[in-house]
Image: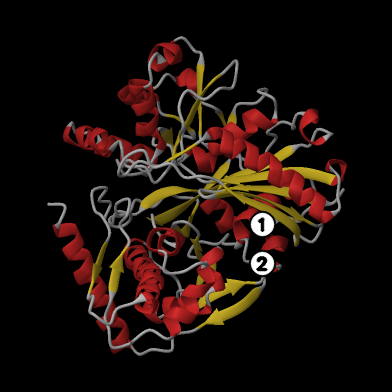
Amino acid sequence: MTHILAIDQGTTSSRAIVFDGDIRPVASAQLEFEQHFPRSGWVEHDPADIWVTTVETCSGALARAGLAARDISAIGITNQRETTLVWDKTTGEPVYNAIVWQDRRTAEICEDLKAAGHAELVQSTTGLLLDPYFSGTKIKWILDNVDGARARADAGELLFGTVDSFLIWKLTGGKVHATDATNAARTLIYDIHTGAWSRDICDLLGIPMTMLPEVKDCAADFGETDADLFGVAIPIRGVAGDQQAATIGQACFQPGMLKSTYGTGCFALLNTGTSPVTSQNRLLTTIAYQLDGQPTYALEGAIFIAGAVVQWLRDGLGIIRDAAETEPLAEKADDGQDLILVPAFTGLGAPYWNPNARGAVFGLSRNSGPAEMSKAALESVGFQTRDLLEAMHADFDFSGDTVLRVDGGMTASGWAMQFLSDILGAPVDRPVVAESTAKGAAWLAGMQIGVYPDMETFAASWEKDTQFVPARDESWREARYESWKKAIAATLSMTD
């Protein structure tokens, strides 16, 4: 029993990956599920889709690996963060769809809280900004807008959880209601300094504390799966939100180490050590991981739309059939066109934090076509990453040169990674195991039960596949970035 099963429940799909005793992926299964957009700026998931695809991919990954559940030592879970579920503690039935992290319906709630002077309390306590991105105002919306929900919550009948909590509760047959410190730190109601739910903020939002899960370390005992699910009970021993799991999988364990994950969105985390750093540039202060009761903190920059912009080219515009088509299209694009795509489809994240911004394209001409749009889409991810690194350098004293470790689906595009290196003016390292998120969750679970090595040994085993180094000069880099900043300014002007 040296295999670990990692559940990677993401925004657009659920995946399960089996890792062997050397923390190498040996088999996986993945299922996409439907995205629901009831109104402009609203994004929801059917909780049943999250649950069913999770169970089916676990069974599928085991089958592809030629393993049975009895061959699995433990499960590690990583998940889309901030996505909010509220369910009946007796039946397990959700009272409403899952409200996804991208959802902007609580923008007015956030503005009212800011106007009432509560922004400082929230940031100083949670490290977060008052924004619809986070779970707290989503919980409030459900309690205020679903018939009978508030009365049931006040009566102790309802539970809240991010996706990890919901899966733990379902996997254990309702026996365990828990989360880890990294997911708790994204809810807007968790005190990252004391390591406890904030009664002041819960009271402010009208959230009964009886709804909240127990908060544990990232490597801890989260119970066992119901034996009826997979044939035997499997221990759940590791949990981390997807971006923190990727930070762990990339072995960014030293202050100053930096990773960026390119999935539906893009999230850059900078390890700042055992003391939290308050951003002066609208980044988030968060928990990178917590082991043995000791939190390690990070500065985080969140971009809402990264890989999702390629999905938009495919599903919205219909100019590609597969994400892999963007790279050859970008390569043949007309370099004479300075096309800039600002993918603010659900608002702008760090460092702008404008929920009312919407997407825009600048520089269109009669000659602009699928190639130029593909190039602009891939470049938009690099530009947004540059925004994050500019803010991080202003907030934190880096020792030595910046090197960015990258992971996620978009890193398969060598063109996109080369542009990223060029626009940053810094090396970009792509690891051998690109699925750092699942690897981080697997290591947490395996380390907790003694199958995988300690942190230092794990970090020493990190392997680089490719390093992309800048191939463009400073004048090109600054001219391109200046075009991006002008496009951002124009986009933001439309929200005034």
- Residue that mark 2 sits on: 433
Q: Residue 44: image x %, image y %?
A: 43, 39
Query: Number of callouts in the render?
Result: 2
Residue at horizontal 79 percent and vertical 29 percent from the top:
228
Residue at horizontal 34 percent and vertical 28 percent from the top:
141
Residue 418 in view: no
- Residue that mark 1 sits on: 439
Q: Residue extending furthest left?
A: 496
Reply above or below: 8 against 149. Answer: below
Few, some or many residues within 10 Å of mark 1 (<14, 14–19, 20+): many
Q: Residue 482: image x %, image y %?
A: 23, 76
Q: Residue 257: image x %, image y %?
A: 51, 65
Q: Is residue 413 left or right of residue 201?
A: right
Q: Secondary structure at mark 1?
A: helix
Query: In this view of the protein, which residue sits in the foreground, 227 or 447?
Result: 227
What's the amino acid at mark 2? Val
Mark-to-mark CA distance, 2 and 1: 8 Å
Q: How is the image coloured?
A: secondary structure
Query: In this view of the protein, which residue sits in the foreground, 361 or 181?
Result: 361
What's the amino acid at mark 1? Lys
Few, some or many residues within 10 Å of mark 2 (<14, 14–19, 20+): many
Reply above or below: 443 against 214. Answer: below
Residue 133 in view: yes
Reply above or below: 435 against 337. Answer: above
The answer to whether marks 2 and 1 mark residues whose Cβ atoms lie closer than 8 Å is yes
